[in-house]
Amino acid sequence: MKTSSPVSGEVFDTKLAAIFNEPALADEARQAVQDALALPDAQVCVILPGDPAADRKLEPEIQGIKATMVRSHVTMGAAGVVAGVVAWLVLHFIDIPMITQSSWLSLGALLFFGGIAGLLVGGLLSLRPDHDRYVHTVKAALRKGRPAVVVHARSPEERARAAALLEGRGGTAVSSL
């Protein structure tokens, strides 16, 4: 399936959860979201306290997560190398003596450090810090005995529509970026 971003390997790149007080309310909200947005069961589910598959329901795309790690490092590493070349060209063009007197050495250094900086950014993206609040909020609610409805949205627009529906049914929504 097609992914939503050149850096991400996930099909459903944006996540949404809504915390409810009762399992029946959560199930009604799940059904309302599925009906209103025509989403399949794979995109919307209820997680009940004690559910052994809670982690898998929160982050179902294990292969996508692995692909995100590879893609983010390759893409950001290449972008870092390009940034190193651009920096070298700018410094060479404005005639910086250290750059012009040792062109190949300075180009190699800027390529190396640009690539390393890009790989570091790729690593940060692989950690997916935008998912932390989403995951921790749901797990805390489950520990307190409250169910959650989870929506794996294809776009920010789909996520926003689902959030409005879930909040309209009394849920407290939390999402990734």
Image (tube, helix red, strand yellow):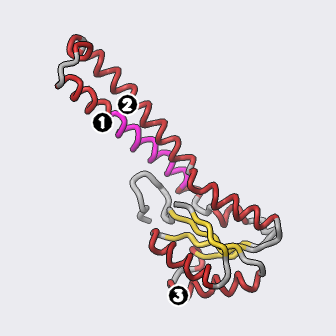
The one of 84 and 60 positioned closer to us in this rendering: 84
Q: Which residue is mark 1?
A: 82
Which amino acid type corresponds to the residue marked 3 in the rendered image?
Ala
Marks 2 and 1 sit apart, C-alpha to C-alpha, by: 8 Å
Residue at 75% over, 85% down: 24
Q: Which class describes the residues within 10 Å of circle 1: few (<14), some (14-19), or many (20+)?
A: some
From what the image shows, is residue 133 above or below residue 87? Answer: below
The one of 27 and 3 positioned closer to us in this rendering: 27
Q: Is residue 68 magenta?
A: yes
**Lower sequence index among marks 2 and 1:** 1
Give the SS element for disc 2.
helix
Residue 171, image x and y in percent?
67, 78
Residue 45, image x and y in percent?
65, 75
**Relative horizontal placement of residue 72, taking residue 96 as reference (left or right):** right
Mark 2–mark 1 CB contact (< 8 Å): yes
Marks 2 and 3 sit apart, C-alpha to C-alpha, by: 47 Å
Q: Which residue is mark 2?
A: 114
Choose top left, top right, bottom left or bottom right for residue 169.
bottom right
The one of 5 and 132 positioned closer to us in this rendering: 132
Q: Which residues are magenta?
A: 65-82
Q: Which residue is mark 3?
A: 36
